[in-house]
């Protein structure tokens, strides 16, 4: 007879993805964090370095999917971010999975935008696609799905 606690009603413990080495999982999270941090730091060279030459990008519901050059995506981000006195782009709850052409990483996001003492916050979920580059991983796709917003939407011009 075995004595112990009954674990039959407990949810299963999440397992580590055995197909991905821990170093690759860490690298995926690192490049995504570096990319979002670069927007707040206005460090456009770092932002471009995180991206593959071309990126599949969509920001639903406002922007349909398109494959665009990395420099063009960074210019779009730069144009949006420089409208504000300050921004803070936070990503969290990273879930990394293997994909046929590399990895995916799903995150929750919360983006804060401040101008003239007024704030607009956008939140939701993003899925990043990543591929191995010469010495690191690079972002090849970003699918952004905003699910909520709060604050002064008039801070952002209509598309």
Image: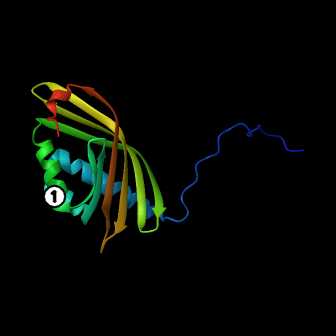
Q: At which x and y percent is residue 10?
A: 68, 38
Tell me the quarter of the image containing the N terminus: top right
Name the foreground residue: 135 vs 50: 50
- State whether residue 137 is above or below residue 110: below
Q: Is residue 43 visible?
A: no
Number of numbered markers = 1
State the residue position of label 1.
72
- Display colour scheme: rainbow
Describe residue 93's horizontal placement relative to residue 154 as left or right: right
Q: Quadrant of residue 137?
A: bottom left
Q: Residue at x 42, y 62 (%)?
A: 103
In the displayed orientation, state which residue is furthest to the right.
Answer: 1
Q: Residue at x 13, y 24 (%)?
A: 117
Q: Residues within 10 Å of mark 1 (few under 14, many from 20)?
A: few
- State whether residue 17 is above or below residue 113: below
Q: At which x and y percent is residue 153?
A: 20, 28
Q: Dot 1: what SS?
A: helix
- State whether residue 4 is above or below residue 21: above
Q: At which x and y percent is residue 55?
A: 27, 61
Q: Is residue 68 visible?
A: yes
Q: At which x and y percent is residue 33?
A: 30, 51
Tell me the quarter of the image containing the C terminus: top left
Describe residue 14's horizontal placement relative to residue 66 as left or right: right
Q: Residue at x 33, y 46 (%)?
A: 144
């Amino acid at each position: 007879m075995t004595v112990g606690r009954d674990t039959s009603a407990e949810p299963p413990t999440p397992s580590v993805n055995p197909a991905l080495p821990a170093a690759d999982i860490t690298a995926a999270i690192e490049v995504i964090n570096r990319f979002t941090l670069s927007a707040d730091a206005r460090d456009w060279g770092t932002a471009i370095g995180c991206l593959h030459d071309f990126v599949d990008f969509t920001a639903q519901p406002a922007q349909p999917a398109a494959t665009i050059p990395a420099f063009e995506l960074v210019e779009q981000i730069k144009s949006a971010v420089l409208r504000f006195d300050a921004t803070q782009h936070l990503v969290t709850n990273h879930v990394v999975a293997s994909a046929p052409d590399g990895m995916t990483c799903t995150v929750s996001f919360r983006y804060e935008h401040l101008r003239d003492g007024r704030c607009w916050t956008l939140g939701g979920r993003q899925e990043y696609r990543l591929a191995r580059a010469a010495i690191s991983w690079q972002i090849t796709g970003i699918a952004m799905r905003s699910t909520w917003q709060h604050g002064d939407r008039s801070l952002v011009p209509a598309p």
